Amino acid sequence: VTSLKGKDLLELGDCTSLEVSQLIELAVKLKKATKEGACPPLLEDKTLGMIFEKSSTRTRVSFEVAMNQLGGKSMYMNANDLQLGRGESISDTGHVLSGYLEGIMIRANSHEKVVELAKHASIPVINGLTDLAHPCQALADLETIYEVKGTFKGLKLAYIGDGNNVVHSLMNACAHVGMDLAIATPKGYEPNQDIMNEAKNIASANDCTILHTFEPIEAASNADIIYTDVWTSMGQEDECEKRLQDFKEFQINDALVAHAKSDYIFMHCLPAHREEEVTSSIIDSSHSVIYQQAENRLHAQKALLVSILAD
Ligand code: CP
Ligand code: NVA
């Protein structure tokens, strides 16, 4: 996707719908090539720095393996081990790292920090999750839906749970590919209104709808995809007890999925808390595509890295 060369990826709302579709096409191609043992070494001599302020399994490993398979290198940096953890500014960090690396992936507590880093780094910055957005996850989600359902048009995705980073990026993702999205959250846990308005604008250009409700059954009704995420995100641990109460009616269980289409698929970005946001009967059922979804982080990010970093 040549138009992404040298650019940052902070949130999917910054991409065009064409760029998002092309990324998914490229992800599918690179997955096939990888399975055939023929992943092209398009990132030889490139090093991606990966800064983490929060824990990660999928993002860390899939980015590292993606760089390896593309012939490049990656470097894991725990933010606390950098001078950043002792108060060095984000801007100095961005300037300095730009002299060593070809790109930076960062998982940060606050989205503003990532925006600030992108402003001061002369190399591309990729958002590996902030409090506001998780665009790399949404790209892998689209790839998975495309693989399983063969299309986006005419599908309804129901996201039931917290109005968090994951659903923010999912809103933009669905809007770009023309897939209907129904979001159900408890009162007080609605998605960010600005992101929702932005996504609605993209959706109306692509003939699809984004709807928010407080009724899980309304969202789940006739859905092709049922998606949820943890009720307590990283950094919200203090609110865990309250959230367990507030989200009780929003669990994905047998009664709720009975309202979805009979061939619905279940998705979750993982990590999951079984018996909280989803019962084992659903997440371990034949409807669940969670491991395919997790694997696709690797392939979707390869498409992204190649588009942004390759010569
Ligand atoms: N889904 C996701 O981003 O997982 P990690 O937190 O393990 O990276
Ligand atoms: N919403 C979750 C996603 C983890 C991948 C969190 O931010 O912790």
Image: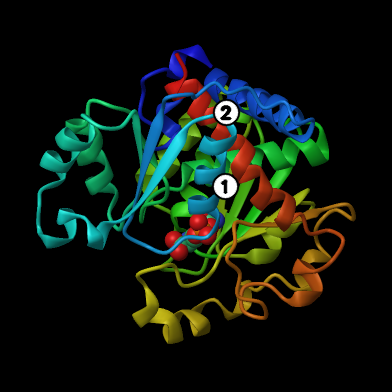
Note whether 158 is above or below 100 in the view shown. below
Q: Is residue 170 visible?
A: no
Residue at the spot x=44%, y=87% of the render?
Answer: 241
Relative to residue 270, is residue 279 drawn left or right? Answer: right
Image spot of residue 86 (x, y percent): 12, 61
Q: How is the image coloured?
A: rainbow
With respect to residue 304, does 66 lie above or below?
Answer: below
Camera-near label (1 vs 2) is 2
The picture quadrant where one finds residue 21 is: top right
Indicate whether 32 appears above or below 251. Answer: above
Q: In this rendering, would 195 be left or right of 160?
A: left
67, 127: nearer the viewer: 67
Q: Is residue 271 above or below residue 210?
A: below
Q: Position of residue 211 (x, y in %)?
A: 57, 47
Instruction: Write down the residue under mark 2.
Output: 303
* Amino acid type of the residue tagged 1 in the rendering: Leu
Q: Quadrant of the C terminus?
A: top left
Question: In the rendering, at what x and y percent does residue 261 appear?
Answer: 85, 53
**Residue corresponding to mark 1:** 211
The numbered mark at residue 38 is: none
Which amino acid type is marked by label 2?
Ala
The span from disc 1 to disc 2 (Cα, nearest Å) is 30 Å
Residue projecting furthest to the right: 262
Instruction: Identify which residue is drawn at 45% across, 58% down.
Output: 164
Q: Is residue 194 visible?
A: yes
Q: Callout 2: helix, strand or loop? A: helix
Provide the secondary structure element on which disc 1 rests: strand
Relative depth, front residue between 49 and 132: 49
Report the residue at 71% width, 32% height from top: 34
Residue 126 coordinates in the image, percent (x, y): 39, 37
